[in-house]
C-alpha cells in the first residue's frame, strides 16, 4: 500500500474521530482538570463553603464580599509549599490570587463534606 493511500485512510479516520468527539462532548460542561492545582481548586469549589468569623470581618474591612473568594477559587494558585497536606482528616490549603485589584491569600480547611475558609489576608506582590 502506498504512503499516500495510508495517509488518506489515517486522515479520514482521524477526521471521523474528531467529529464524533465534538458531537459527544460539544454540549457538555467537560473540563480537563488534571493538574494538582486545578484538581484542588475544583474539589474545594464543589463543596459547601463555610466562612470563619475573622474571615468575614476581614473581607468586610477590605470592602470585599464572599464572591471574591469564589473568584479566587476559580483563578487562584494553590501554594502547596505553605499548605498542610499531611493531615488525615482535613487538609489545609493556602490559595493566593488577584481579586478586584487586590492580592488576596486565603487558608482553606478542606474536609470531606465542607470547605472552611479559615482566614484571609492581602499581600504585596
Image (cartoon, rainbow, N blue to C red):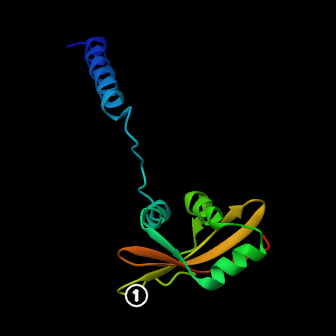
**Which residue occupies the foreground of this view, 79 or 11?**
79
Quick check: 19 above or below 119?
above
10 Å crowding of disc 1: few (<14), some (14-19), many (20+)? few
Q: Is residue 124 left or right of residue 47?
A: right
In the rendered image, is residue 120 in sight? no
Residue farthest bottom in this picture: 87
* Residue shown at the point (38%, 31%) measured from the top left: 26
Q: Position of residue 34 (x, y in %)?
A: 41, 56
Query: Where is 103 relative to 33, above or below?
Result: below
The image quadrant that residue 53 belongs to is bottom right
Going by the image, does 15 lie left or right of 102? left
Q: Nearer the viewer, residue 120 or 59?
A: 59
Q: Position of residue 43 (x, y in %)?
A: 42, 65
In the rendered image, the quadrant that contains the N terminus is top left
Q: How many marks?
A: 1
Residue drawn where x is 66% and y is 65% of the image? 97
Residue name at image x 36 percent, y 29 percent: 22
Judging from the image, what secondary structure is the residue with disc 1 in?
loop
Q: Report the residue that reaches farthest toward the left.
A: 1
Identify which residue, 51 or 75, lies in the foreground.
Answer: 51
Q: Tell me if 5 is positioned left or right of 36 in this view.
A: left
Q: Position of residue 103 (x, y in %)?
A: 74, 68
Judging by the rendered image, the residue that carries numbered circle 1 is: 87
Q: Can I make out residue 115 in this image?
A: yes
Residue 47's image quarter? bottom left
Residue 125: percent from the left, percent from the top?
A: 78, 70
Amino acid at each position: 500500500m502506498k504512503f499516500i493511500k495510508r495517509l488518506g485512510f489515517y486522515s479520514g479516520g482521524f477526521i471521523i474521530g474528531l467529529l464524533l468527539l465534538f458531537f459527544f462532548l460539544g454540549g457538555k460542561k467537560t473540563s480537563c482538570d488534571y493538574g494538582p492545582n486545578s484538581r484542588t481548586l475544583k474539589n474545594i469549589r464543589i463543596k459547601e463553603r463555610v466562612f470563619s468569623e475573622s474571615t468575614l470581618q476581614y473581607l468586610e474591612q477590605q470592602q470585599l464580599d464572599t464572591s471574591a473568594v469564589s473568584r479566587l477559587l476559580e483563578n487562584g494558585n494553590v501554594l502547596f509549599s505553605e499548605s498542610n497536606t499531611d493531615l488525615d482528616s482535613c487538609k489545609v490549603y493556602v490559595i493566593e490570587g488577584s481579586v478586584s485589584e487586590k492580592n488576596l491569600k486565603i487558608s482553606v480547611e478542606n474536609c470531606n463534606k465542607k470547605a472552611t475558609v479559615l482566614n484571609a489576608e492581602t499581600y504585596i506582590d
